[in-house]
Image (cartoon, grey):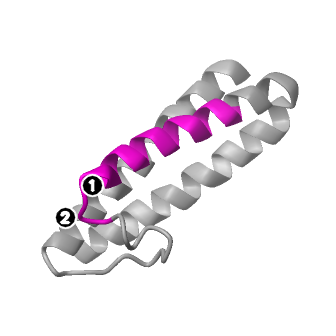
Amino acid sequence: MKRSLMLILLGLLVAFVIADGLITEFLINGGIAREGNPLLEEWVGKQGFILLKVVGSLACAYILWDIYRRFPRVALVSASCFVVAYGLIVLWNLSLAL
């Protein structure tokens, strides 16, 4: 049961990170918002931004899965926190779009 929960959390995390990237691109290209993360500010609007989000989210999922194999509770709690955080970020971005 814990294994399937972890896989669901990792899938949600990847989906939320990619959704964040797509919505951010839409908002910035539409002049509705600006990037709040100074490290990503230079990347937004360039071709590599979505690729960066996809590769970064998959790398994070892999790292969390590796942690899960050794410390399941730590990984489940961490993944849950990241999913909630990115879920809130996606909701915030969507509220700006509306």
- Of the residues shown, which amino acid type is indicated by label 2? Phe
Q: In this rendering, would 80 be left or right of 56?
A: right
* Label 2 CA crowd tier, 10 Å (few <14, some 14–19, many 20+): some
Q: Farthest right residue?
A: 71
Asked if the residue at tag 1 contacts the one at tag 2, i.e. Cβ–Cβ closer than 8 Å, the answer is yes
Q: State the image coordinates of residue 49 (x, y, percent, origin top left).
A: 33, 55
Relative placement, left or right, of 64 versus 92 is right
* Residue 22 location (% of width, % of height): 27, 54
Residue 57 seen in this snapshot: yes
Residue 22 marker: 1
Q: Badge 2 is on which residue?
A: 26
Residue 38 or residue 27, whichever sits in front: 38
Query: Where residue 55 sits: x, y (%)?
Result: 45, 39
Say whether residue 9 is visible: no
Q: Quadrant of the C terminus?
A: bottom left
In the rendered view, would you say 94 is above or below 74?
Answer: below
Name above or below for residue 87 compared with residue 55.
below
- Main SS type for the magenta part? helix
16 with respect to 56 (left or right): left
Magenta segment includes 29:
no
Secondary structure found at label 2: helix
12 and 32: which is toward the camera: 32
Tell me where residue 12 appears, x and y as whole percent: 48, 39
Q: Which residue is drawn at 45% across and 65% down?
A: 89
Quadrant in which the N terminus appears: top right
Q: What residue do we see at 44% from left, 78% from top? A: 36
Inspect the image, locate mark 1, and give the three-letter code of the amino acid beneath it: Leu
**How far apart are labels 2 and 1 at the CA level?**
6 Å
The magenta region covers 44-64
Q: Is mark 1 on a helix, strand or loop?
A: helix
Q: Nearer the viewer, residue 75 or 52?
A: 52
Position of residue 61 relative to residue 46, above or below, is above
